[in-house]
Amino acid sequence: MGNKDVNENIVGDKKVTVVFVLGGPGSGKGTQCATIVQHYGFTHLSAGDLLRAEIKSGSKNGTVIQNMIQEGKIVPSEVTIKLLQQAMLESGNEKFLIDGFPRNEENRAAFERVTKIVPEFVLFFDCSEEEMERRLLNRNQGRADDNIETIRKRFKVFVQSSLPVVQHYDSQGKVKKIDAGKPIVEVVEDVKAIFSSYGAKST
């Protein structure tokens, strides 16, 4: 290929806008993604949801994914990226929030290499470990997998794997940081301020 820009950020025949949404467990990013979808017409794609849906579909690909997860292996970036590309194409939209991906630097590099898509920016929900713990423990009372040790482990994985992704994009001036420790109403206003330039959803 000659000029990299020729096919950059194209899905099908559309030029797309992609925003990566990153934040630790309990940072409230799912709630805020719903707000962005509702007000600004983005399509919300969760890498985890797409993998679960593929497994549930009973497809050959789904069985391979399920076996990998059961064996404790990490699903290759290309598999997740292919599902994201397919979902983007099928949605018919050109504005996407990709939630919970890239989880690490390898995911990030593979996404840009495979899709030729560079994110518009990264929406980073910054929240202290103490606040996340409090929220998760309140939210998941009675769920065995959300005890304090599990929560701390998940937070540690986020810091080790996902923060380098945030730092990479921060060095390019592409990170928009939200103080997710604030009350939800204030967080919503901060999110709206960032997305206001992307146009309200036409009804």
Image (tube, helix red, strand yellow):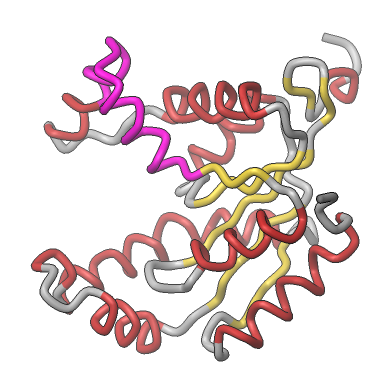
Which corner quadrant holds the N terminus?
Answer: top right
Residue ID at (46%, 49%):
103
Left or right: 63 in relation to 176: left
Residue ID at (48%, 25%):
83
The part of the image, by quadrant, that contains residue 72 is: top left
Decide: is 97 above or below 11: below
Left or right: 74 in relation to 200: left
x, y percent for residue 87: 56, 27
The part of the image, by quadrant, that contains residue 10 is: top right
Residue 47 belongs to magenta span: yes
x, y percent for residue 150: 18, 68
x, y percent for residue 15: 84, 28
Decide: is 154 above or below 169: below
Range of magenta residues: 46-65
Residue ID at (65%, 76%):
178
Residue 18 belongs to magenta span: no
Left or right: 181 in relation to 147: right
